[in-house]
Amino acid sequence: MSSSLLTGIMMDRPLLIRDILLHAERTCPDQEIVSVTGKGTYHRTTYGETFRRARKLANALEELNIRPGDRIATMAWNDYRHLEIYYAVACSGSVCHTINPRLTPEQITYIINHAEDSWLFTSINFMPLLETILPDIPNVKGFVILMDEEDGTITDLPRAIAYETLLAPASDKYEWPEFPETSASSLCYTSGTTGRPKGVLYSHRSTVLHTMMCNLSASIGLSEMDTVMPVVPMFHVNAWGVPYSAAMAGAKIVLPGPHMGNGELLQELIELEQVTVGFGVPTIWLALLHYLETSGKSVDSLIRIYTGGTASPRHLMDTFLRQYGVDTVHLWGMTELSPLGTLNQAEVRTDLSYDERMDLRCMQGRPAFGVEMKLKDDVGQTVPHDGKTPGFLYVRGYAVCRGYLGPVGDENETSAHSSHDKEGWLNTGDIATIDQQGYLRITDRAKDMIKSGGEWISSIELENLAMAHPDIVEAAAIAMPDKKWGERPLVIAVKKQGSTVIEQDLLNWYKDKLPGWMLPDKVVFVSELPHTATGKVVKSQLRSEIDRYLQNNHHTKGKSPEKKVHHSGLFM
Ligand code: ADP
């Protein structure tokens, strides 16, 4: 580009999370933030009070000698204190490192040491976990326990202080500093289902841009009229950015604390607090739906739910709309994308029939503004966006990571070479099609595709079809080794309570819906599927256990496999 480009004469204000905080303080100080505590009681506060306490915390962090750039870890639920930490840490120039407490103690130890966390803030109920890993995290200088005064004194944990004790003497006068917008604000490690967890280091700029991307009306577009309930944990990808987007929009926030998967509590919260918008993985919404169906209760205030993290079953979206008038917006995203990638506002397609719109909803949607997508084949050639040809999905955008956190202080060591192509696009590890209107359909994670006789079979398609059966609650499809074809599909399903459906029924169900070579060879029923804390089925566990299961049950051909007891306990 020629050097004669003219520079615009506009202010060059840095994009800082501080500005979201200041904006909320100016425009909606009295808007409510409701949290459910560990004891099940409701705690009520406002944006004004939350940010006043965030200032006290910023002063307290200085007292603890925490410096700009230091990583401050959290192991905490969705509640007001976690929100205060989010803002106080990032806006004072340190980095809020949210840790998923559902990872293994080894992974958590690895993450804390890799990130070189200097302090750790933890909910009181993770104390046993903390005590387990304590000897292996010697570089953490101290621990702040998120607890009420009346919860008593802290155990004999060394270098520990209660959050309220830390805050009590601190002044609420604090001038949020200004610094370059590219400064790191928060850190989240991927779940490590494909190797070591990798650190995604968000910046103030990427976070503010992501918040604006979410708040466009063509996107999620929260408003002051909304009461938002993120049932996605604040320890994973910043609860899909809701703590920022709700504050920017002035929406009321309802935080369910440790009670995420409890359908009864979610229904109660929705009714009592008049929640209009919810965010969660399909498992959460299935739990709510199950409670609604069994209790006969309703969720009248609820207008929209956003679902992502894994493909959303059609019947989930259909039942919510038909029975409860709730619109489901299907999202696709990743930790690496902050996380918003695509979203599917199927309701805008008034040109389509109800059933056609429902089919459309099963796709992951079109890119949010600020996200670009392309497909490549296995030799790196571009794949056409014809809605049919699958390819490896690559993305780039305003809030997409350009590498992963290497040893801190070594900016070049970001291990980007394995995850990004030469042009700097991120390889998502997903296989997808994109149609001419820009709609994305994820057909699989590359590692979950089933290759039979050289042809790819989509595990997501097999799962969606199984879950469309009226007696099936959840299903996972995995590859079974096969001498002739290399791999053949096996479906592992959870049936509805009291259902008498058997393997052959489900195999017959598939018959007129797929070509012969795509049909699953076998169906196994289990009482439940193993999930990660972020709602994904742990297919690696299914793969390792299914081999043993099949060997154990080899001689029982013809008998109903669900009756067999497997020593892992997973397979019935
Ligand atoms: P991880 O830490 O495992 O990367 P993420 O939450 O970042 O966890 O997971 C991102 C992955 O989740 C995507 O690459 C994709 O495979 C899957 N995913 C997310 N949303 C959807 C969706 N709507 N449909 C299908 N897969 C999805």
Image: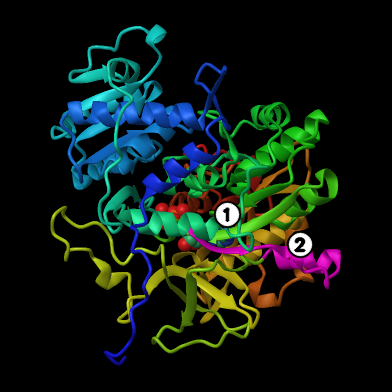
Look at the image and say whether residue 322 sits in the magenta stretch. Answer: no
Q: Which residue is mark 2?
A: 347
Residue at horizontal 51%, vertical 37%?
569
Of discs 1 and 2, which sits in the foreground? 2
Q: Secondary structure at mark 2?
A: helix
Image check: 134 left or right of 398?
Answer: left
Depth check, front residue: 443 or 448? 443
Q: Which residue is mark 1?
A: 308
Image check: 541 left or right of 126?
Answer: right
Q: Badge 2: how crowded within 10 Å, few (<14), some, or many (20+)?
A: some
Protein image colouring: rainbow
Look at the image and say whether residue 358 sits in the magenta stretch. Answer: yes
Task: Report which quarter residue 272 is drawn in.
Answer: top right
Question: Looking at the picture, how far across and down is residue 233, in whole percent?
Answer: 48, 40
What amino acid is found at the position of numbered circle 2 in the picture? Glu
Asked if residue 217 is positioned above or below residue 436 in the image, the reply reads above
What amino acid is found at the position of numbered circle 1 in the picture? Gly
Image check: 183 left or right of 373?
Answer: left
Question: Looking at the picture, how far across and down is residue 387, in whole percent?
Answer: 63, 81
Residue projecting furthest to the front:
9
